[in-house]
């Protein structure tokens, strides 16, 4: 590369050029929703992300603002944050399959129907998911385990799937957000230079009001709604008992996983153990379930091993004699998670292209250049968080990039860094699940079987969190201003 080429490679892309791939991506997704429906996003979004990544690289090459070194660095940054999620996705698929077929989820559904009061189901679901997520530090683990069980129970009780998923996600993301075991909480505090527990305490100013409104809303829906009759629930219970061996012994598996979580065993090990215990539970508690799925007898050890492999890998279906229950007891296996994994990888490539071409940095500079007032700074941080969640399709990258974008701005104008760390959590961590092409939105919609746009209006905690942080910024309540020039 000669001197003139090197000079071209160091040029920064313009804002208009940088926004072009993002505009193409967002416009394409909007057109898909308009003409094919929201459910089609999962079918085409990976293509949109790849095309947008190619456009970013091509435009940068045409304008000579790209270098191989910068592009490779962008790929490394994006891959280091997103690729570790792939094995977790595979394990989540295995847990969802094995915990269903081993009887863990059916047993929880059976007990839930008998013990849970339908009137208080939504508020109980939200509170329990919040508690479990605080203990685990992982909204993904909470949703993939007890969240799946609550979906089945709620449908039996006659609740709309949007309300059920909204209660699960609201509780799980509240717990994840305020848990010291949460990776996003640790990343948000560390990237902004804030003590972890100081960060969590400051989070409570926005999280507690948002969660309180969510719980009250779920309670009101339960009090005002119509729920399944006892006879209908009894039919579901009979169908469960005719298909599965319902026994409290199946709950040994989640009990062991709960102990591992309390001991702070790494997530990868915990989920792997949950998968292994789930496979063992199929043979111990449901010895006839594989033969029912295969539709033929299994006589040798090899037959059982091959049937297990096929069941874990591919989609399965069971006939329970109850049409409303049949869809619940069907499983997707690893193949059901492959589209999600593909989309996560495509999101990684798009994020790498935007970072490696310098386009994301150009957009960030445009966001922060003229910020001077408290309200506008926090407002821009919230907008940037939503934009980054859409642009990088990954909450980890969005938090890290957002922290880098605004850390000096907050220091320059005397705003405490814990305001930045809290705002990033409110605008990135909890909203990632609301974006259909974000890795969180794709994963949770796949796990729960509810499309992102279906549950979005019902995720009250997630929707309110960024709004409340804006209100606090504009009113000046406990903003922690360090210098007198920051005034509204």
Image (tube, helix red, strand yellow):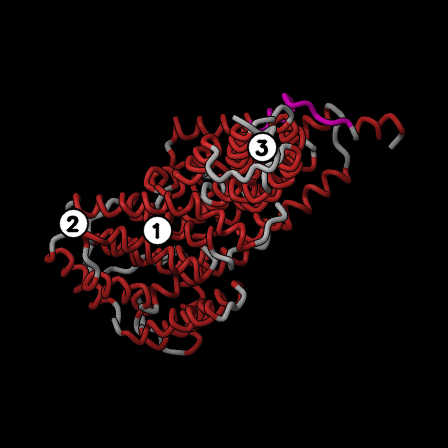
The 10 Å Cα crowd at callout 3, few under 14, some 14 to 19, many 20 or more, is: some
Question: For the stretch drawn in magenta, what is the main secondary structure?
Answer: helix
Q: In the image, residue 2 lies at what x, y percent?
A: 89, 30
Callout 1–callout 3 Cβ contact below 8 Å: no
The residue positioned 36% from the left and 42% from the top of the image is: 459
The residue positioned 39% from the left and 38% from the top of the image is: 463
Q: Secondary structure at mark 2?
A: loop
Q: CA distance from mark 2 to mark 3?
A: 46 Å
Question: Compared with residue 358, is residue 455 higher up or lower down, i.e. above or below?
Answer: below
Magenta-colored stretch includes residue 14: yes
Callout 2–callout 3 Cβ contact below 8 Å: no
Q: In the image, residue 20 lies at what x, y percent?
A: 60, 24
Is 188 positioned to the left or the right of 214 in the image? right
Q: Which mark is residue 168?
A: 1
- Which residue, given by chain and number where applicable, does mark 2 sit on? 227
Q: Nearer the viewer, mark 2 or mark 3?
A: 2
Q: In the image, residue 8 lies at what x, y percent?
A: 80, 26
Q: Tell me where residue 283 sits by quadrant.
A: bottom left
Q: Secondary structure at mark 3?
A: helix
- Which residue, given by chain and number where applicable, does mark 3 sit on? 51
Q: In terms of sequence position, does the residue under pointer 2 or pointer 3 come before the other?
A: 3
Residue 393 makes an appearance in the image? no
Q: CA distance from mark 1 to mark 3?
A: 34 Å
Boundaries of the magenta span: 11-22
Question: Compared with residue 488, is residue 140 higher up or lower down, i.e. above or below?
Answer: below
């Amino acid at each position: 590369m000669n001197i003139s080429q090197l000079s071209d490679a160091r040029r920064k892309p313009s804002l208009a050029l940088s926004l072009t791939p993002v505009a193409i991506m967002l416009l394409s997704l909007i057109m898909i929703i308009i003409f094919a429906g929201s459910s089609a996003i999962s079918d085409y979004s990976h293509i949109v992300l790849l095309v947008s990544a190619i456009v970013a690289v091509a435009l940068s090459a045409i304008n000579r603002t790209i270098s191989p070194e910068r592009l490779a660095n962008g790929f490394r940054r994006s891959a280091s944050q997103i690729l570790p999620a792939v094995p977790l996705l595979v394990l989540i698929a295995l847990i969802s399959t094995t915990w269903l077929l081993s009887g863990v989820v059916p047993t929880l559904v059976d007990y839930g129907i008998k013990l849970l009061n339908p009137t208080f189901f939504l508020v109980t679901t939200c509170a329990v998911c919040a508690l479990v997520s605080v203990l685990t530090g992982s909204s993904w683990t909470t949703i993939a385990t007890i969240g799946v069980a609550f979906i089945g129970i709620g449908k039996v009780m006659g609740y709309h799937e949007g309300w059920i998923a909204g209660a699960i996600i609201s509780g799980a993301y509240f717990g994840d957000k305020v848990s010291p075991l949460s990776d996003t909480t640790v990343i948000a505090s560390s990237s902004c230079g804030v003590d972890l527990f100081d960060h969590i305490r400051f989070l409570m100013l926005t999280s507690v009001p948002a969660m309180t409104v969510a719980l009250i809303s779920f309670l009101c829906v339960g009090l005002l709604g119509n729920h399944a009759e006892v006879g209908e629930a009894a039919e579901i219970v009979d169908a469960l008992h005719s298909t599965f061996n319902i026994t409290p012994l199946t709950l040994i598996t989640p009990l062991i996983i709960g102990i591992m979580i309390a001991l702070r065993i790494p997530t990868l090990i915990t989920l792997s153990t949950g998968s292994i215990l789930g496979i063992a539970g199929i043979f111990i508690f449901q010895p006839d379930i594989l033969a029912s799925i295969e539709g033929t007898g299994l006589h040798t050890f090899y037959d059982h091993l091959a049937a297990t492999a096929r069941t874990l890998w591919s989609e399965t279906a069971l006939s329970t004699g109850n049409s409303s229950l049949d869809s619940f007891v069907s499983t997707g296996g690893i193949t059901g998670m492959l589209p999600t994994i593909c989309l996560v990888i495509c999101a990684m490539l798009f994020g790498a292209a935007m970072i490696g071409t310098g386009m994301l940095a150009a957009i960030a500079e445009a966001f922060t250049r003229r910020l001077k007032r408290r309200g506008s700074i926090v407002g821009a941080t919230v907008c940037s968080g939503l934009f980054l969640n859409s642009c990088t399709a990954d909450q980890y990258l969005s938090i890290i990039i957002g922290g880098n974008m605004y850390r000096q701005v907050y220091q320059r104008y005397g705003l405490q860094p814990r305001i930045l760390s809290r705002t990033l959590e409110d605008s990135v961590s909890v909203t990632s699940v609301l974006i259909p092409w974000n890795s969180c939105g794709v994963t949770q919609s796949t796990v729960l079987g509810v499309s992102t746009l279906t549950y979005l209006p019902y995720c009250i905690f997630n929707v309110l969190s960024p709004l409340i942080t804006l209100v606090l910024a504009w009113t000046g309540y406990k903003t922690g201003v360090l210098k007198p020039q920051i005034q509204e």
